[in-house]
Image (cartoon, coloured by chain):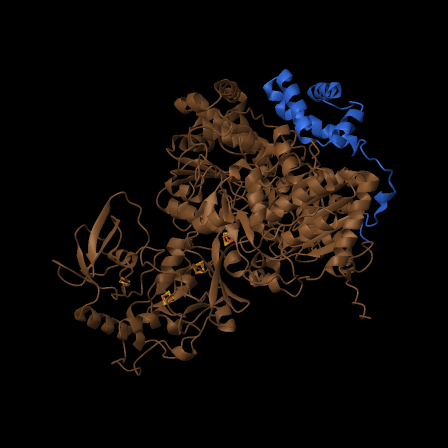
Chain colours: A brown, B blue
């Protein structure tokens, strides 16, 4: 494939029912009313010269290059700002227009360096293209006048440079930052000739400004003014492959632009339905980990974790591993073996891991890292609605009138979707935030939350039940919806329960810390919508009442009729790229793909016939249960694909003890992660750039991941799992992930119509894709709930057993930050560390003062479970009594202090509430020093023995 | 030295294939927690829901473990659910 930029239609697509037909340069074209003449021309294959217009932002009409003539009208209007009208006759190329355009172009070029041949954007520059398009040959003004050619280059951003000498002041970057990203970091300073793009305030550069490095301005820039450093270093791309980001659950699609086998840049794909051409710093820029020096590319084994690793061939590693697993199975039974699938791997890889466990190991001891994030979503939404998934597509937010964001921090964790939210909020939608911390969304440029309910961590259920109390007792229930769509008996029980005075906002205010009037107003706003949508994250699920909170959310949506159409719904924002997919693929120990319980004989029979094995009909162990069982001696071997449970799971010491008690720990990953310190087998993994498969994002959208380069380790991850299965004698014969998807589709009703061919054709599909919904389902539960009638569930507030007291008076809650991802294994190995070098502890000024602390001080963070040290940051973003940190760095390992309290229904850990004390410290704790020593020792690799 | 076990000492533990697993006190805690969250539905419903939950989500070793547990410290709802589990 040769390299071409994605076609730019000049102005955004218009969705309108009325169509208009016009004639452009003699060609008839029909477009939705409101479409610009520029876009209409592009739709019929024409291309009007342009500089300030681009199709992901509103027309601006400043460059005057796109002039056209319209029959019966005077002058030469700009085609980007002129709407197409019925019967219009437009000429885009006339001698008069050509002359005018050449004049405009001359002015631009006279203040632009003429070093095209040596410019890194040569042949990939719109200014150059347009100069050619208007036939500019020479410039009359000469170059001796004032210009900007000597302006210094701003290289502060690690991924792109800003070279103002090349700027034509078209404002595309400024508008991209405003309209697409919503950060408003850029301005045009000065007027007329003196005008210049500037980041932040005077004296700022890109890095010190508000810029979040999303890359939207770089993509928008028609010149080499804003350009990726990698293009300068590697050269212009020669081909591109569309693939899906492997970071978060937004599921942005990108064009991986390649030069030979080298990735030059990732450019957001405008046809991607999840991201609509936008990106964040992670997917856009932070892919350098793929060839980081720490990457391990050959298999390694060792008898005990005290020995150094020994590099071996794939054959030896697989034979060794299969031998171990078979021996353990023979001695201790199938239930001594288990596996963990990864929400970072593809659907096909995940499906194979659970198949290996169920069909090969012979147990149902398979779980996924979603256990520690969204398992309560699985339980809660399955119980109330009948299936475990968000109800909407992302586009739906553009029709929401009220957004209720609870326990989520979208601008950091789901940035591209947050930009859509902010756009809708700037259009006037109202926002309610329920979060102990003042997340950025509460107040960003031109956005201010109507209500911020800064509740005490651990009181979600109380707050939501109090909102339900207001809705029921103030007569705000959508009675018609409830009568038609829900189980009415269950509704009545629930309504009676929430109406009780002990669930009133006034009664609960003391527990939740939320003033009753604020809560009442928020409940009314949500109930009155008319379109109200709930978005939630791990601040909902990672509690001892995570599942209850999810059900309380579902109750609110049903009671107010906010389900089953665009603009409303219940939307879990998924952390990792394929959390939805990993759950769909049967990664939980109690269910097969498509959320069917393992005890269901008909479903089991389907799988047994296809796989030619008999399956255990009892649920298996969940991750925390596996660790407990390991300490008990009954669970002895684990295959962990693409997860780092030692760092990501709570109560690190307990995880370490569980792993240390096992006979065979197999880690399949890119790096020697923290879990690998306890492993006996290391199977090198491949990156998303090196594999084919699919990811499913938070809106149930299944998208293709396409291989753009050969795996550095020699095998894609599904091939490794297959090789291990075959070493155990399973005889699998997949030749491509598409065959695995065919098997998934054959065995899973909601995936019935999914295949690689269809995904290739359609770009993406949102499950269910079946006979009733052959093209997928953007919105779910439209005519009825998956379970039939929606089920209201009584959710009683049960305080967590993790209590503050004299020794541990503060509540710790944890979260993540924009530039880093999860345990940081990938992002720490990129230049993203400039934004977040270490985890810090946010503490309120009052709590800091009581302890004599200031920002930058080393502090000791201690809980009943353990202690660690990190630096303090004094801020009123957190409420008094609450402290907050992230868990991206192994040196801190915030999970040393988190407890093993967990959700009552799913054992999802209670990361969000830990009673702690904070005090001044001199440096790393004993634990940190010991761990650093252990990690160093454990990561030793013995020098390879010389070949015979 | 690190302050948690780094040696696979557990391999010296007895083979407990198909028998109860885990610290039964922890299992009792879990059963109580489940029962407590269903309690608002009324006692009989909560007993049935707790039993159903354990049947659906606990592995056989955990079920065996809670049956082995003497019932000490179990809340009334959890205790009734566990005796129903015992009766099958
Ligand atoms: S990278 Fe994004 S946030 Fe930064 S200036 Fe450009 S558009 Fe704005
Ligand atoms: S930096 Fe690029 S996009 Fe921004 S005004 Fe200059 S030329 Fe236009
Ligand atoms: S990390 Fe998420 S928001 Fe950022 S580019 Fe990737 S999928 Fe998009
Ligand atoms: S492209 Fe229309 S005025 Fe610039």
In the rendered image, the vertical position of residue A695 relative to residue A457, given as above or below: below
Q: Quadrant of residue A141?
A: bottom left
Q: Say above or below: A453 vs B68.
A: below
Q: Is A125 left, or right, of A828 in this rendering? A: left
Q: Does residue A588 appear anywhere in the picture?
A: yes
In the image, taking residue A707 as reference, residue A936 lies left or right, namely: right
Q: Nearer the viewer, residue A173 or A137?
A: A137
Residue drawn at x 78%, y 67% is A944
Q: Residue at x 71, y 62 (%)?
A: A298
Q: Quadrant of ligand 4?
A: bottom left
How many numbered discs, if any? 0
Comparing A724 with A690, the one in front is: A724
Q: Residue furthest top?
A: B44
Tell me if residue A876 can be seen. no
Is A570 in front, or is A433? A570
Where residue A429 appears, as percent x and y from the top left, is 37, 41
Quadrant of the image for the C terminus of chain A? bottom right
- Toward the viewer: B12 or A175? B12
Residue B53: give x, y in percent of width and height: 65, 27
Tell whether A928 sits left or right of A100.
right
Q: Position of residue A453 (x, y in %)?
A: 49, 37
Depicted A742 relative to depicted A789: above or below = below
Question: Whole-percent x and y of residue A869?
Answer: 69, 52
């Amino acid at each position: 494939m040769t390299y071409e930029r994605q076609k730019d239609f000049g102005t955004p697509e218009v969705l309108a029912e009325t169509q208009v037909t016009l004639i452009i340069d003699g060609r008839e074209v029909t477009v939705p009313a409101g479409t610009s003449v520029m876009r209409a021309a592009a739709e019929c294959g024409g291309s009007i010269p342009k500089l300030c217009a681009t199709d992901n932002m509103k027309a601006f009409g400043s460059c005057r290059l796109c002039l056209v003539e319209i029959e019966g009208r005077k002058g030469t209007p700009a085609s980007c700002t002129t709407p197409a009208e019925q019967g219009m006759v437009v000429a885009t190329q006339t001698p008069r227009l050509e002359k005018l355009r050449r004049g405009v172009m001359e002015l631009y070029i006279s203040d632009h360096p003429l070093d095209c041949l040596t410019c890194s954007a040569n042949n990939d520059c719109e200014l150059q293209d347009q100069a050619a398009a208007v036939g500019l040959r020479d410039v009359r003004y000469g170059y001796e006048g004032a210009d900007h050619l000597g302006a210094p280059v701003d290289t502060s951003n690690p991924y792109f440079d800003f070279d103002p000498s090349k700027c034509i002041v078209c404002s595309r970057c400024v508008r991209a930052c405003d309209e697409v990203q919503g950060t408003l970091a850029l301005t045009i300073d000065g007027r007329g000739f003196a005008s210049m793009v500037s980041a932040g305030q005077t004296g700022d550069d890109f890095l010190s400004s508000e810029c979040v490095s999303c890359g939207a301005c770089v993509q928008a820039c028609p010149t080499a003014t804003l350009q990726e450093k990698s293009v300068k270093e590697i050269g212009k791309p020669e081909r591109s492959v569309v693939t899906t980001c492997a970071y978060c659950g937004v599921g942005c699609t990108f064009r991986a632009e390649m030069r030979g086998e080298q990735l030059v840049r990732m450019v957001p794909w405008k046809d991607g339905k999840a991201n609509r051409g936008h990106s964040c710093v992670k997917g856009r820029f932070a892919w350098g980990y793929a060839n980081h020096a720490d990457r391990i590319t050959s298999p390694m084994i060792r008898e005990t974790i005290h020995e150094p690793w020994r590099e071996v061939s794939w054959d030896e590693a697989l034979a060794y591993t299969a031998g171990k697993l078979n021996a353990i199975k023979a001695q201790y039974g199938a239930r001594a073996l288990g596996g963990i699938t990864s929400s970072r791997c593809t659907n096909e890889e995940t499906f194979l891991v659970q198949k290996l466990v169920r069909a090969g190991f012979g147990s149902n001891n398979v779980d996924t890292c979603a256990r520690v994030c969204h398992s309560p979503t699985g339980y809660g939404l399955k119980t109330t609605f009948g299936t475990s998934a968000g109800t909407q597509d992302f586009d739906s937010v553009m029709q929401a009138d009220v957004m209720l964001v609870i326990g989520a921090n979208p601008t950091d964790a789901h940035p591209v979707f947050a930009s859509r939210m902010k756009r809708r909020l700037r259009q006037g939608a109202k926002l309610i935030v329920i979060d102990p911390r003042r997340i950025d969304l509460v107040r960003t440029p031109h956005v201010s939350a109507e209500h911020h309910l800064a509740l005490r961590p651990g009181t979600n259920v109380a707050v939501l039940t109090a909102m339900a109390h207001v809705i029921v007792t103030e007569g705000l229930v959508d009675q018609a919806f409830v009568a038609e769509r829900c189980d009415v008996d269950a509704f009545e029980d629930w309504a009676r329960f929430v109406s009780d005075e002990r669930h009133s906002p006034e009664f609960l205010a003391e527990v939740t810390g939320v003033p009753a009037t604020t809560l009442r107003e928020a409940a009314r706003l949500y109930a009155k919508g008319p379109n109200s949508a709930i978005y939630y994250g791990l601040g909902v699920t990672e509690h001892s009442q995570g599942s209850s909170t999810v059900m309380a959310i579902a109750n609110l949506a049903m009671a107010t009729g906010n389900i089953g159409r665009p603009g409303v719904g219940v939307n879990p924002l998924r952390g990792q790229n394929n959390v939805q997919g990993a759950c769909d693929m049967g990664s939980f120990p109690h269910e097969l793909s498509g959320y069917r319980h393992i005890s269901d004989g008909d479903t089991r029979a389907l799988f047994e016939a296809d796989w030619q094995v008999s399956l255990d009909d009892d649920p298996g162990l969940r991750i925390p249960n596996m660790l407990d069982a390991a300490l008990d001696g009954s669970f002895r071997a684990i295959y962990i694909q693409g997860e780092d449970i030692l760092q990501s799971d709570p109560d690190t010491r307990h995880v370490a003890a569980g792993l240390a008690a096992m006979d065979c720990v197999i880690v399949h990953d890119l790096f020697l992660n923290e879990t690998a310190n306890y492993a006996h087998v290391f199977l090198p993994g491949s990156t998303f750039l090196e594999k084919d498969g699919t990811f499913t994002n938070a809106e149930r959208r299944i998208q293709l991941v396409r291989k753009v380069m050969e795996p550095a380790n020699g095998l894609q991850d599904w091939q490794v799992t297959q090789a291990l299965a075959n070493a155990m004698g399973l005889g699998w014969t997949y030749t491509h992930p598409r065959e695995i998807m065919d098997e998934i589709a054959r065995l899973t009703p909601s995936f019935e119509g999914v295949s690689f061919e269809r995904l290739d054709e359609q770009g993406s599909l949102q499950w269910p894709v079946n006979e009733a919904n052959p093209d997928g389902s953007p919105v779910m539960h439209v005519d009825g709930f998956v379970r039939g009638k929606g089920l209201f569930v009584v959710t009683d507030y049960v305080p967590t057993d993790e209590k503050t007291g004299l020794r541990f008076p503060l509540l710790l809650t944890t979260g993540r930050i924009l530039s880093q991802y999860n345990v940081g294994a990938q992002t720490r190995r990129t230049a993203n560390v400039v934004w977040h070098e270490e985890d810090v502890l946010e503490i309120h000024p009052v709590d800091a003062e009581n302890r004599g602390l200031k920002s930058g001080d080393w502090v000791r963070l201690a809980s009943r479970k353990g202690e660690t040290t990190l630096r303090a940051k004094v801020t009123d973003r957190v409420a008094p009594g609450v402290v907050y940190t992230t868990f991206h760095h192994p040196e801190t390992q915030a999970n040393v202090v988190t407890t093993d309290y967990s959700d009552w229904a799913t054992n999802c850990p209670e990361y969000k509430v830990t009673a702690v004390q904070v005090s001044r410290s001199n440096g790393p704790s004993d634990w940190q020093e010991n761990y650093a020593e252990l990690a160093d020792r454990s990561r030793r690799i013995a020098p390879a023995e010389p070949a015979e | 030295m690190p302050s948690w076990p780094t040696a696979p000492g557990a391999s010296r533990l007895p083979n407990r294939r198909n028998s109860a697993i885990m610290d039964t006190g922890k299992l009792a805690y879990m059963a109580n927690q489940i029962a407590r969250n269903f309690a608002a539905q009324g006692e009989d419903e909560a007993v049935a829901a707790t039993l159903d939950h354990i049947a659906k989500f606990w592995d056989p070793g955990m079920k065996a473990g809670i049956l082995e547990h003497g019932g000490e410290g179990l809340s009334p709802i959890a205790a009734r659910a566990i005796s129903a589990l015992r009766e099958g």
